[in-house]
Image (spheres, grey):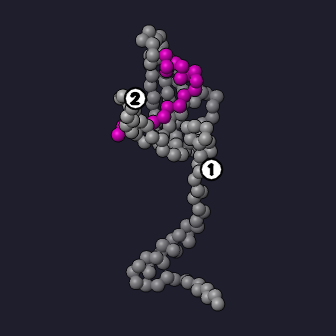
Amino acid sequence: MEEQFILRVPPAVAQRIERLLNDSSASSEDKNLDMVFSEDGRTGTFVIGNDRFSSSLLDLPSVVESYKTYDDNVLIKTADIGQMIMVREESDGVPEAVEYRHGLTPPMREARRRRFRREPDLNPEVVRRVERDLQNIMAGGTAENIDILLSC
């Protein structure tokens, strides 16, 4: 399978990329297209022509499948896409999280909050105690500090 991602750009940048791909006589100013990531691998700069835009690599809330066809009849799965590069205008804010809250389509708005369970709030000390008790039981011992409730 191939490695793929979604590239989400502002409308003005999308028009420039479309002109670059479709017109062989595109101006030499737009022919420069580059993406450079910083050390953290999550933020970077998208360059088209002489213009620079900030960008972020975001995880999608769900996996999107990508297909291609050679004969318009048979679809071949090419990748599972789980990340998106979001290119922003200067006026747009920087995303605060590494996971994009929404999916790619309107029905997936607030997908993480609406479609998936919240992770439970667990006390780390309780988890360690239960883990220790389970290891004792598996080793042939007994659990410590047991409160037995008998109901009649």
Side (left or right) of 94 relative to 134: right
In which quadrant of the rendered view does residue 103 lie? top right
Q: Secondary structure at mark 2?
A: loop
Quadrant the C terminus occupies = bottom right
Residue holding disc 2: 72
Numbered badge on residue 124 = none
Q: Position of residue 68 (x, y in %)?
A: 40, 33
Side (left or right) of 115 relative to 37: right
Residue 3 magenta: yes
Q: Secondary structure at mark 1?
A: helix
Q: Which residues are magenta?
A: 1-19
Any part of residue 58 in sight: yes
The three-letter code of the residue at mark 1 reads: Arg
Name the residue: 53% across, 33% down. 86
Residue holding disc 1: 114
Any part of residue 28 in sight: no
Q: Position of residue 132 (x, y in %)?
A: 47, 75
